[in-house]
Image: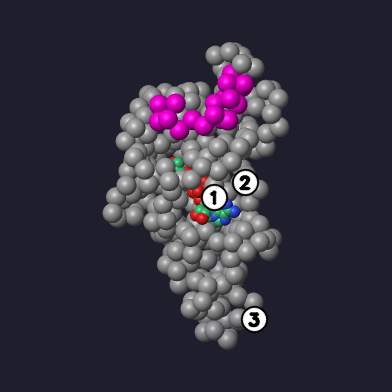
Amino acid sequence: MSSQRATAFVPGHVTAFFSAHPADEPAVAGSRGAGVTLTDGVTVRVSAPAGETDAATGGDGGAASDGPGSRTIDGEPGSIGAVDDVLAELGARGADVAVETDLPIGAGFGISGAAALGAALAANDAFDRGRSENDLVRIAHAAEVGRGTGLGDVVAQARGGVPVRLEPGAPGVGELDGVPATARVEYVTFGELSTEAVLGGDTDALTAAGEDALDRLRADPRLPTLMDAARRFAREADLLVPEAAEAIAAVDADGGSPESSGSPDDLGAAMAMLGRTVFALGTGLSDAGYDPNVCRIDAAGARLVDERGRE
Ligand SMILES: Nc1ncnc2c1ncn2[C@@H]1O[C@H](COP(=O)(O)OP(=O)(O)O)[C@@H](O)[C@H]1O
Ligand SMILES: CC(C)(COP(=O)(O)O)[C@@H](O)C(=O)O
Protein backbone atom coordinates (compact mmCIF):
# COMPACT_ATOMS: atom_id res chain seq x y z
CA MET A 1 0.00 0.00 0.00
CA SER A 2 1.29 3.46 -0.81
CA SER A 3 1.74 6.01 1.96
CA GLN A 4 -0.72 8.45 0.31
CA ARG A 5 1.30 11.50 1.31
CA ALA A 6 4.87 12.68 0.85
CA THR A 7 6.96 15.83 1.09
CA ALA A 8 9.94 16.96 -0.97
CA PHE A 9 12.36 19.87 -0.62
CA VAL A 10 13.95 21.39 -3.72
CA PRO A 11 16.59 24.15 -3.50
CA GLY A 12 16.07 27.47 -5.21
CA HIS A 13 18.38 27.98 -8.21
CA VAL A 14 19.80 31.30 -9.31
CA THR A 15 21.15 31.24 -12.84
CA ALA A 16 24.30 33.34 -13.22
CA PHE A 17 24.42 33.07 -17.03
CA PHE A 18 22.89 30.84 -19.69
CA SER A 19 22.43 30.12 -23.38
CA ALA A 20 19.06 28.93 -24.71
CA HIS A 21 18.79 25.69 -26.72
CA PRO A 22 15.20 25.11 -27.77
CA ALA A 23 14.20 21.81 -29.41
CA ASP A 24 10.97 20.08 -30.35
CA GLU A 25 11.62 17.22 -27.99
CA PRO A 26 11.35 18.45 -24.38
CA ALA A 27 14.08 16.14 -23.05
CA VAL A 28 16.50 17.59 -25.63
CA ALA A 29 15.58 21.25 -25.07
CA GLY A 30 17.38 23.11 -22.31
CA SER A 31 20.14 25.53 -21.55
CA ARG A 32 23.86 25.63 -21.00
CA GLY A 33 25.09 27.80 -18.17
CA ALA A 34 25.86 27.95 -14.48
CA GLY A 35 24.36 29.13 -11.22
CA VAL A 36 24.06 28.43 -7.51
CA THR A 37 21.49 26.30 -5.67
CA LEU A 38 20.26 27.67 -2.36
CA THR A 39 19.42 26.30 1.08
CA ASP A 40 16.30 28.49 0.67
CA GLY A 41 13.91 26.62 -1.59
CA VAL A 42 10.51 25.08 -2.11
CA THR A 43 8.71 22.48 -0.01
CA VAL A 44 6.03 20.49 -1.85
CA ARG A 45 3.48 18.36 0.01
CA VAL A 46 1.45 15.90 -2.05
CA SER A 47 -1.43 13.92 -0.56
CA ALA A 48 -4.53 11.97 -1.54
CA PRO A 49 -7.61 14.20 -1.46
CA ALA A 50 -9.31 14.42 1.94
CA GLY A 51 -11.82 11.62 2.51
CA GLU A 52 -10.28 9.37 -0.16
CA THR A 53 -8.68 6.19 1.13
CA ASP A 54 -6.77 3.39 -0.47
CA ALA A 55 -9.61 0.93 0.08
CA ALA A 56 -12.18 3.34 -1.33
CA THR A 57 -10.26 4.20 -4.47
CA GLY A 58 -8.57 1.01 -5.45
CA GLY A 59 -5.10 2.03 -4.41
CA ASP A 60 -4.40 5.43 -5.91
CA GLY A 61 -6.04 7.43 -3.12
CA GLY A 62 -8.16 9.32 -5.62
CA ALA A 63 -5.00 10.71 -7.17
CA ALA A 64 -5.93 9.60 -10.68
CA SER A 65 -9.45 11.03 -10.56
CA ASP A 66 -10.59 13.30 -13.40
CA GLY A 67 -10.79 16.61 -11.57
CA PRO A 68 -7.63 18.27 -10.26
CA GLY A 69 -7.13 18.23 -6.48
CA SER A 70 -6.54 21.35 -4.41
CA ARG A 71 -3.51 23.53 -5.28
CA THR A 72 -2.09 26.06 -2.84
CA ILE A 73 0.96 28.32 -2.82
CA ASP A 74 1.92 29.46 0.69
CA GLY A 75 -1.54 28.51 1.93
CA GLU A 76 -3.48 30.49 -0.69
CA PRO A 77 -5.19 28.96 -3.71
CA GLY A 78 -2.73 29.07 -6.62
CA SER A 79 -1.23 26.81 -9.23
CA ILE A 80 1.91 26.46 -11.33
CA GLY A 81 1.38 25.02 -14.80
CA ALA A 82 4.42 22.75 -14.72
CA VAL A 83 3.17 21.13 -11.50
CA ASP A 84 -0.16 20.22 -13.09
CA ASP A 85 1.65 18.68 -16.08
CA VAL A 86 3.89 16.59 -13.80
CA LEU A 87 0.89 15.25 -11.87
CA ALA A 88 -0.95 14.38 -15.09
CA GLU A 89 2.11 12.48 -16.32
CA LEU A 90 2.23 10.48 -13.07
CA GLY A 91 -1.50 9.77 -13.09
CA ALA A 92 -1.96 11.92 -9.99
CA ARG A 93 -4.06 14.89 -11.14
CA GLY A 94 -6.49 14.38 -8.28
CA ALA A 95 -3.83 14.77 -5.60
CA ASP A 96 -3.80 17.76 -3.26
CA VAL A 97 -0.59 19.78 -3.66
CA ALA A 98 0.70 22.43 -1.27
CA VAL A 99 3.71 24.48 -2.39
CA GLU A 100 5.51 26.51 0.27
CA THR A 101 8.43 28.85 -0.17
CA ASP A 102 10.02 31.89 1.42
CA LEU A 103 11.49 32.84 -1.96
CA PRO A 104 9.62 35.27 -4.24
CA ILE A 105 7.94 33.73 -7.30
CA GLY A 106 8.93 34.91 -10.78
CA ALA A 107 12.05 36.70 -9.53
CA GLY A 108 14.73 34.33 -10.85
CA PHE A 109 14.86 31.58 -8.22
CA GLY A 110 13.46 28.82 -10.43
CA ILE A 111 10.34 28.36 -8.32
CA SER A 112 8.34 26.78 -11.12
CA GLY A 113 11.06 24.19 -11.78
CA ALA A 114 11.47 23.50 -8.07
CA ALA A 115 7.73 23.05 -7.58
CA ALA A 116 7.54 20.71 -10.59
CA LEU A 117 10.47 18.58 -9.40
CA GLY A 118 9.17 18.51 -5.82
CA ALA A 119 5.74 17.44 -7.06
CA ALA A 120 7.33 14.65 -9.12
CA LEU A 121 9.40 13.29 -6.20
CA ALA A 122 6.53 13.56 -3.71
CA ALA A 123 3.78 12.15 -5.98
CA ASN A 124 5.98 9.20 -6.96
CA ASP A 125 6.54 8.42 -3.28
CA ALA A 126 2.98 9.09 -2.08
CA PHE A 127 1.36 6.88 -4.73
CA ASP A 128 4.19 4.36 -5.18
CA ARG A 129 4.64 5.02 -8.89
CA GLY A 130 8.02 3.27 -8.96
CA ARG A 131 9.86 5.79 -11.16
CA SER A 132 13.62 6.36 -10.87
CA GLU A 133 15.20 9.72 -10.01
CA ASN A 134 16.31 10.28 -13.62
CA ASP A 135 12.75 9.55 -14.79
CA LEU A 136 11.27 12.05 -12.35
CA VAL A 137 13.81 14.75 -13.26
CA ARG A 138 13.01 14.13 -16.94
CA ILE A 139 9.26 14.50 -16.30
CA ALA A 140 9.73 17.74 -14.34
CA HIS A 141 12.18 19.11 -16.94
CA ALA A 142 9.76 18.36 -19.78
CA ALA A 143 6.90 20.06 -17.91
CA GLU A 144 9.00 23.16 -17.18
CA VAL A 145 10.31 23.44 -20.74
CA GLY A 146 6.84 22.81 -22.14
CA ARG A 147 5.40 25.69 -20.12
CA GLY A 148 8.21 28.05 -21.15
CA THR A 149 9.00 28.92 -17.52
CA GLY A 150 12.56 27.60 -17.52
CA LEU A 151 15.19 25.57 -19.36
CA GLY A 152 17.87 24.46 -16.96
CA ASP A 153 16.57 24.95 -13.44
CA VAL A 154 15.26 21.41 -12.92
CA VAL A 155 18.49 19.56 -13.75
CA ALA A 156 20.45 22.06 -11.66
CA GLN A 157 18.08 21.73 -8.69
CA ALA A 158 18.27 17.94 -8.86
CA ARG A 159 22.06 18.16 -8.52
CA GLY A 160 22.55 20.87 -5.87
CA GLY A 161 25.82 22.73 -5.22
CA VAL A 162 27.04 25.03 -7.99
CA PRO A 163 25.77 23.29 -11.14
CA VAL A 164 27.42 23.87 -14.49
CA ARG A 165 25.24 22.80 -17.40
CA LEU A 166 27.74 21.70 -20.06
CA GLU A 167 25.14 20.26 -22.44
CA PRO A 168 21.42 21.10 -22.45
CA GLY A 169 18.64 18.66 -21.70
CA ALA A 170 17.24 16.12 -19.27
CA PRO A 171 19.23 13.23 -17.73
CA GLY A 172 20.51 10.95 -20.48
CA VAL A 173 20.74 13.87 -22.89
CA GLY A 174 22.30 16.78 -21.02
CA GLU A 175 25.59 16.86 -19.17
CA LEU A 176 26.37 18.44 -15.82
CA ASP A 177 29.51 19.44 -13.99
CA GLY A 178 29.93 21.65 -10.94
CA VAL A 179 32.14 24.18 -9.19
CA PRO A 180 33.24 22.42 -5.99
CA ALA A 181 32.67 25.23 -3.51
CA THR A 182 30.42 26.52 -0.77
CA ALA A 183 29.57 30.10 0.23
CA ARG A 184 27.22 32.40 2.08
CA VAL A 185 24.61 33.81 -0.32
CA GLU A 186 22.81 37.15 0.10
CA TYR A 187 19.96 38.33 -2.12
CA VAL A 188 17.56 41.22 -2.59
CA THR A 189 14.61 41.28 -4.96
CA PHE A 190 13.17 44.33 -6.70
CA GLY A 191 10.44 42.50 -8.66
CA GLU A 192 9.54 39.95 -11.30
CA LEU A 193 10.81 39.51 -14.84
CA SER A 194 8.79 37.30 -17.16
CA THR A 195 10.78 34.21 -18.13
CA GLU A 196 8.19 33.36 -20.79
CA ALA A 197 8.66 36.79 -22.43
CA VAL A 198 12.48 36.63 -22.53
CA LEU A 199 12.60 33.02 -23.77
CA GLY A 200 9.85 33.76 -26.30
CA GLY A 201 11.83 36.68 -27.82
CA ASP A 202 15.08 36.82 -29.78
CA THR A 203 17.66 34.87 -27.75
CA ASP A 204 20.62 35.11 -30.17
CA ALA A 205 22.53 37.81 -28.26
CA LEU A 206 22.03 36.20 -24.89
CA THR A 207 23.04 32.81 -26.22
CA ALA A 208 26.28 34.20 -27.69
CA ALA A 209 27.07 35.91 -24.38
CA GLY A 210 26.16 32.76 -22.44
CA GLU A 211 28.47 30.58 -24.52
CA ASP A 212 31.37 33.01 -23.91
CA ALA A 213 30.66 32.97 -20.17
CA LEU A 214 30.63 29.18 -20.08
CA ASP A 215 33.98 29.00 -21.91
CA ARG A 216 35.48 31.29 -19.28
CA LEU A 217 34.10 29.24 -16.39
CA ARG A 218 35.26 25.96 -17.91
CA ALA A 219 38.77 27.37 -18.20
CA ASP A 220 38.69 28.42 -14.53
CA PRO A 221 35.93 26.65 -12.54
CA ARG A 222 36.04 28.88 -9.45
CA LEU A 223 33.41 31.11 -7.78
CA PRO A 224 35.14 34.46 -8.55
CA THR A 225 35.13 33.56 -12.26
CA LEU A 226 31.45 32.53 -12.03
CA MET A 227 30.51 35.93 -10.58
CA ASP A 228 32.68 37.87 -13.00
CA ALA A 229 31.21 35.98 -15.96
CA ALA A 230 27.68 36.61 -14.60
CA ARG A 231 28.22 40.37 -14.40
CA ARG A 232 29.59 40.52 -17.94
CA PHE A 233 26.77 38.26 -19.25
CA ALA A 234 24.00 40.51 -17.89
CA ARG A 235 25.53 43.52 -19.68
CA GLU A 236 26.31 41.76 -22.96
CA ALA A 237 22.93 40.01 -23.12
CA ASP A 238 21.25 43.38 -22.44
CA LEU A 239 19.31 41.91 -19.53
CA LEU A 240 20.68 44.14 -16.75
CA VAL A 241 17.78 46.10 -15.20
CA PRO A 242 18.54 49.50 -13.59
CA GLU A 243 17.76 48.42 -10.00
CA ALA A 244 20.16 45.51 -10.34
CA ALA A 245 22.88 47.66 -11.94
CA GLU A 246 22.61 50.08 -9.02
CA ALA A 247 22.91 47.38 -6.35
CA ILE A 248 25.83 45.67 -8.11
CA ALA A 249 27.62 49.02 -8.40
CA ALA A 250 26.96 49.74 -4.71
CA VAL A 251 28.48 46.40 -3.70
CA ASP A 252 31.49 47.11 -5.90
CA ALA A 253 31.95 50.63 -4.53
CA ASP A 254 31.81 49.29 -0.99
CA GLY A 255 34.62 46.87 -1.66
CA GLY A 256 32.38 43.85 -2.07
CA SER A 257 34.31 42.26 -4.87
CA PRO A 258 37.62 40.45 -4.70
CA GLU A 259 39.29 43.05 -6.94
CA SER A 260 38.35 45.94 -4.65
CA SER A 261 38.24 44.39 -1.16
CA GLY A 262 41.02 41.88 -1.47
CA SER A 263 38.95 39.44 0.64
CA PRO A 264 38.69 35.99 -0.91
CA ASP A 265 35.32 35.53 0.84
CA ASP A 266 33.71 38.52 -0.84
CA LEU A 267 32.92 37.72 -4.42
CA GLY A 268 30.71 40.66 -5.31
CA ALA A 269 27.20 40.66 -6.68
CA ALA A 270 25.43 39.81 -9.94
CA MET A 271 21.90 39.73 -11.34
CA ALA A 272 19.81 36.57 -11.07
CA MET A 273 18.48 35.28 -14.38
CA LEU A 274 15.65 35.86 -14.94
CA GLY A 275 14.42 38.21 -12.25
CA ARG A 276 14.84 41.69 -10.83
CA THR A 277 17.07 40.12 -8.20
CA VAL A 278 20.67 40.67 -7.16
CA PHE A 279 22.64 37.97 -5.34
CA ALA A 280 26.02 38.25 -3.66
CA LEU A 281 28.46 35.60 -2.50
CA GLY A 282 29.83 36.79 0.85
CA THR A 283 28.59 39.89 2.67
CA GLY A 284 28.62 42.43 -0.17
CA LEU A 285 24.95 43.43 -0.06
CA SER A 286 24.79 43.84 3.73
CA ASP A 287 28.13 45.71 3.71
CA ALA A 288 26.65 48.09 1.12
CA GLY A 289 23.69 48.88 3.40
CA TYR A 290 21.04 46.58 1.92
CA ASP A 291 18.95 44.31 4.14
CA PRO A 292 19.33 41.06 2.22
CA ASN A 293 17.96 37.58 2.82
CA VAL A 294 20.80 35.26 3.76
CA CYS A 295 21.28 31.56 3.04
CA ARG A 296 24.04 29.28 1.74
CA ILE A 297 24.83 27.22 -1.30
CA ASP A 298 22.81 23.99 -0.98
CA ALA A 299 24.95 20.89 -0.85
CA ALA A 300 22.43 18.14 -1.51
CA GLY A 301 19.98 18.90 -4.30
CA ALA A 302 16.31 17.90 -4.44
CA ARG A 303 15.25 15.30 -1.88
CA LEU A 304 12.32 13.65 -0.17
CA VAL A 305 11.80 14.83 3.40
CA ASP A 306 10.36 12.38 5.88
CA GLU A 307 8.02 14.35 8.10
CA ARG A 308 7.20 11.24 10.14
CA GLY A 309 10.67 11.17 11.69
CA ARG A 310 12.25 8.44 9.54
CA GLU A 311 14.61 10.69 7.54
N1 LIG B 1 1.96 34.71 -7.29
C1 LIG B 1 2.58 34.37 -8.42
N2 LIG B 1 3.49 35.20 -8.97
C2 LIG B 1 4.16 34.86 -10.11
N3 LIG B 1 3.98 33.68 -10.74
C3 LIG B 1 3.08 32.83 -10.24
C4 LIG B 1 2.34 33.11 -9.04
N4 LIG B 1 1.56 32.06 -8.79
C5 LIG B 1 1.79 31.15 -9.75
N5 LIG B 1 2.69 31.59 -10.63
C6 LIG B 1 3.21 30.81 -11.77
O1 LIG B 1 4.55 30.48 -11.40
C7 LIG B 1 5.41 30.44 -12.54
C8 LIG B 1 6.63 31.29 -12.30
O2 LIG B 1 7.55 30.94 -13.27
P1 LIG B 1 8.83 31.82 -13.62
O3 LIG B 1 8.38 33.13 -14.19
O4 LIG B 1 9.73 30.95 -14.38
O5 LIG B 1 9.41 32.17 -12.22
P2 LIG B 1 10.60 31.55 -11.44
O6 LIG B 1 11.75 32.43 -11.80
O7 LIG B 1 10.23 31.70 -10.03
O8 LIG B 1 10.72 30.15 -11.91
C9 LIG B 1 4.58 30.90 -13.71
O9 LIG B 1 4.16 29.73 -14.40
C10 LIG B 1 3.33 31.56 -13.09
O10 LIG B 1 2.19 31.35 -13.88
C1 LIG C 1 17.28 31.47 -16.78
C2 LIG C 1 16.23 30.39 -17.00
C3 LIG C 1 15.94 30.23 -18.48
C4 LIG C 1 14.91 30.80 -16.29
O1 LIG C 1 15.09 30.91 -14.89
P1 LIG C 1 13.86 31.31 -13.93
O2 LIG C 1 13.36 32.65 -14.36
O3 LIG C 1 14.42 31.32 -12.54
O4 LIG C 1 12.80 30.25 -14.09
C5 LIG C 1 16.74 29.04 -16.38
O5 LIG C 1 15.76 28.06 -16.47
C6 LIG C 1 18.01 28.54 -17.06
O6 LIG C 1 17.95 27.77 -18.01
O7 LIG C 1 19.11 28.90 -16.60
Q: Gap in Å between the C-alphas at discs 2 and 3?
A: 32 Å
Q: Locate residue 69, reporting x and y percent.
A: 56, 72
> Within 10 angstroms of label 3, few (less than 14), some, or many (20 or more) residues?
few
Sequence order check, earlier mark of 2 and 3: 3
Q: Quadrant of the N terminus?
A: bottom right
- Asked if residue 195 is positioned above or below residue 99 in the image, the reply reads above
Q: Locate residue 21, reporting x and y percent.
A: 32, 43
Q: Nearer the viewer, residue 194 or 46?
A: 194
Q: Locate residue 266, reporting x and y percent.
A: 60, 22
Q: Quadrant of the C terminus?
A: bottom right
Q: Indicate which disc residue 111 carries.
A: 1
Ligand 1 within 8 angstroms of badge 2 C-beta: yes
Membership of 76 in magenta stretch: no
Q: Indicate which disc residue 103 carries.
A: 2
Q: Residue at x 56, y 78 (%)?
A: 61
Q: Residue furthest left?
A: 24
Q: Is residue 3 left or right of residue 172?
A: right
Residue at label 3? 51
> Within 10 angstroms of label 2, few (less than 14), some, or many (20 or more) residues?
some
Q: Residue at x 52, y 84 (%)?
A: 58
* Amino acid identity at mark 2: Leu
